[in-house]
Image (cartoon, rainbow, N blue to C red):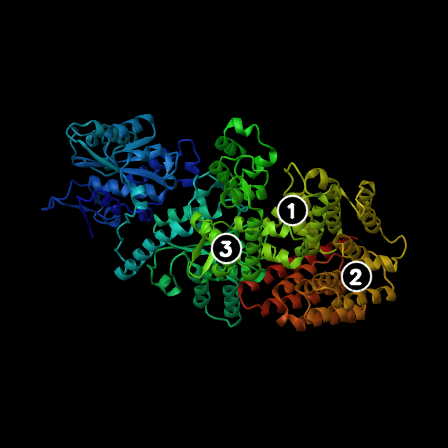
Amino acid sequence: MTWEWPKINERDLARYVIEQSVKWLPLRENRLDLVNHPEGRKLLATAIYRALTEKGIRYDSEQYDPSDYIQPIRTPPEIFESPKVGTCLDLAALFCGLCLGNDLLPLLVVIQGHAFVAVSLNWGKGKWDDLGREEKNHFDKALLTDVAKLREWIDSGAYVAIECTGFAQSTSLPKTVPEGVGRMGNGLLPFDRAVAAGREQLNRADRPFSYALDVATARYQGIEPIGMEVGLDPKSYSIYREYRKRFKEALQTELPGPSVDFGPTFALEGEDAVSVDSLTVKTKEAKRLILRGYAGGGKSAILRKCANQILDEHFIPVIINLKKWTQDDSASLGTAIKQQKDLDEKFGLLLRVSITDLNPRMLDRFPDDFEKFIMVDGLNEVYGRDATREILDLLDDYVRLKGPYVYVVVTDRMVQRESRSTEWKTAQLHLLNLDEVQKRIGDPLWSRLSDSDKELLRVPYYLDYALISRTTKLGSAAKAHESFFKDSFFTEQKTVNESGLSQLAQAAFEAYQEYRSPSFKPEKFRSEIGETLWQKLLESGVVAVSGNDARFDHQLKHDYLASRHLASHEELWDSTSFDVVSFESKTFEPLLMTLEQLANTDQGDRFLTRIYDWNWVATVECLTSTVSSDHKPFSSAIEFVVAAVVAEKLFDPIRPTRERAKRQLSELPPDLSSPFVSAQSIEDLFTLVKAFKSDAPWFGDWRTLFTRHRDRPLSEEEIQKIASANPILGWTASNVIKRFKLTDSDLRQLRAIHDSSDAIPTQLGNVIKWRVVHALGTFDTTENVDLLFRALDGPSHHLVKFGAARSLVEIAAITQHAALRQRIVGGLQSRISYLSRRVLEEIGNAIFYRNAPPTWGSLIVPLLQNIRNAQQDNQAREEFDKVLVNFRKFMEKERGNSNES
């Protein structure tokens, strides 16, 4: 069905440029390979032109229409399939659509009685509104009427003009017009001649210039492409067009674009870095992609850019904004999974936080042959390990069961998740190149910056802030945020209102504490900080209210305020608070900023030891964050001790523990980690520890305890250190105890410490229990197994259950008593149905035990199979299938090692 264009609406010509045309013209060349070439855009335009010459399209003069106001325009199917003919305007509109579909930026040039195309050689479609694209200032509502400018751009090499009738066969065009000169025997123009003819059109006195239409700009100004109704249900297409309109409106408010596009890059595992403009292509190739990046790395802005690209390619875009996700949403999803609700009902829960009103029924009513592209922003902003895993599993199911044309990309921070379906690919968003940062800052300022400032400015969020505030000496992430809030809200007549900022920080911390989400209820928050400050936050856009919820415009601002409160309240340094601000170890930025704000190294040391009591990986992350810092808010002694206790895990009998320790050590500064990584035995670690000098009053006690190794039995006092309020001493005691053979009296002492911990304040009591159940893993007595099962069955803290499961598997692996081994494995089998996923996963880690007995495989394989079969979703079953495969390989290798010895 030929379209009809009312000529009076010049900008509406963009409606007849269809990016979906690329489906009729797959290129032999790889688009990404071409655009990485210095002349990539010209090569890509050449490839499109040459591919068109092979389609057997014939040129047709303009169809007669009795109305002066209407111009017929043929659809892509009419040009490519039947009758395979086109006028100059048909062919120019087609070529523009193919350019947009291949990320080129075309102009549709209209002169009297003719049309052709000019293609930008400097900018791609995704950069249509880049601040550096100076020529856009010469367009008025996407139209250029200054022919001199167009000539200038073409002559300077900024654009290439292309005569589009050149790829259509014609033997009747006169040689008095540019498009008729140079036709070959097959009636086509070679590409170079088409380029020359395009430029010549602008010098014709008999064909005065009318305008050039910037199609990409017209798109973003609301000129939607006309429907490809051929083969589509008109009603479904109408629904789709209305959805696109609402989606574009929501995109402006939900994912506002950055003030500057810094041109970041990312890379999939094992691949080279590519521009974020390639995210759409890479997601389609992977089908399921997790894009990980540092806080402030621009992940949301990149999704916005990706959304704008796919809007031009006739995908069905869906953005799920997890910043709006609440604990109630997580509870609803968990309940739906337990009740085995169908896929659409579960996916509908995710769509509650779509940026537009959307439900599975609406999605199913969209045109079937339009691909669905689901973008999920902010996995790290969902509280709880189980909730994030359930969301990933649900997305995986949706891609699997909704056909071949569904793709999903999820943004997340850099913290590694425990496990996921093997179908997911991961990509890392890179920090900005130092050369790019220097270019933005300018050489004079750059030379005066410290290394830590330069490193911080590699994060787009902080570089953007520095350019806007004209303050490049940020000091640290925490200081940058402090300056922002003080300058914006708490400084009057050069006097800073410290109490007001502290009040805001407390409200932010308590919002995380109460709601476990970046979203919070505005009424309570407003009452805590006062109406005046609340209005300032709203007017500045720092806080926005949507429906019944409010949130900060960037989670880093909320993180900073929570960290400020945490830094000034040492009584909050416990596992509960750390879980609150990190969303259960999902993001460590609040902890890093807390550390940056501490007044002295004594405070820093205490903070790090409390973190170690909660999550040793987070402690390493805190140390790593200061690698380029000019000031480290902790002592060299605590840094050394953390490295040493992590290095001891290199000799752990459980393989995943060894592997994680190796990974974490590699992130520490080489001058600190290299000696530990090079250690061949635990005795080598003792040598390093004994050689280290420190005046810290606690260091001598720690060194004496850490280097104890079977020279004499442990004393009652040494065993009692497992209950120390000093986390480093307590955990060191737990690990040292595992090196020794304890007497029955010693073990009774350990079990008594565990049981008496109920009388100790909850936080410390839970940690002491965790240390004890960890230590019991090398002592295969019936009484110890009884206690560990009791810990697993009772109302113990989840970390105590986690440790108990590991120790039960460890005892089963080391015991010489077959009956005890059978009892443990049988006991775990009987509890599978009510053990948490995390506990089951720890069992799946602990089974990789070095030098386990020959019967180990025959006992563990049925256990793993039962765990696998008990899972309610495909992804969980796949994960345990993978564990089972890896375990069988592990046992084959173990048997080989045993035979060799």
**Whole-percent x, y for residue 430 in the image:** 53, 42
- Name the residue carrying label 3: 530
Determine the CA span between mark 3 and mark 1: 29 Å
Among all residues in the image, which is located at the extreme front?
Answer: 493
Q: Amino acid at mark 1?
A: Leu
CB under 8 Å between discs 3 and 2: no
- Name the residue carrying label 2: 778
**Whole-percent x, y for residue 898 in the image:** 77, 56
Q: Secondary structure at mark 3?
A: loop
Q: Amino acid at mark 2?
A: Thr
Q: Is residue 633 left or right of residue 48?
A: right
Mark 3 or 2, nearer chain start: 3
75 or 427: nearer the eye? 427
Of badges 1 and 2, nearer the viewer stands: 1
Q: Please say whether residue 56 is visible from this viewpoint.
A: no
Of badges 3 and 2, nearer the viewer stands: 3
Q: Secondary structure at mark 2?
A: helix
Q: Amino acid at mark 3?
A: Gly
